Amino acid sequence: MGGLSIWHWLVLVAVIAVLFGGKGKIAGVMGDFAKGIKAFKSGMKDEEAAQNAPPAQVTGQPSAGSASTTADRVATDRT
């Protein structure tokens, strides 16, 4: 009972062949899963960099030469 018989090894090899073998669907799913993990890690690094960046400067009123906002245009159209 302590060791693996030939049948255990054959089943183990078959499972590994299905998971990591040729151009099977499971191998493609595993590759997509790995790409997803890499994208998640990359997104986490980008989020950390954004949190560590200094806050953007906010100005009160738009300058005279800038475009008006939608609210300004609506208020002007109603008068």
Image: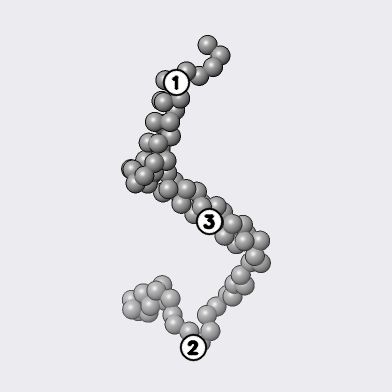
Q: Position of residue 63 (x, y in %)?
A: 53, 84
Question: In which quarter of the view is residue 58 placed?
Answer: bottom right
What is the distance, in whole Å, between disc 2 and disc 3 at their CAs?
A: 37 Å
The kind of secondary structure element at disc 1 is: helix
Image depth: mark 2 or mark 3 in front: 3
Residue 43 is tagged as 3
Point out the residue furthest to the top here. 1
Please name the amino acid that badge 3 sits on: Gly
Q: Is residue 25 above or below residue 67?
A: above
Residue beneath disc 1: 6
Question: How far apart are the two marked residues, 1 and 3, measured between alpha carbons?
Answer: 46 Å
Residue that appears at 59% across and 57% down: 45
Mark 2 closeness class: few <14, some 14–19, many ≥20 residues within 10 Å: few
Residue displayed at 41% across by 25% down: 11
Q: Identify which amino acid the numbered label 1 is placed on.
A: Ile
Task: Tell us which disc is closer to us: 1 or 3.
Answer: 1
Image location (x, y in percent) of residue 2: 56, 14
Image location (x, y in percent) of residue 6: 44, 20
Disc with the residue nearer the chain's start (2 vs 1): 1
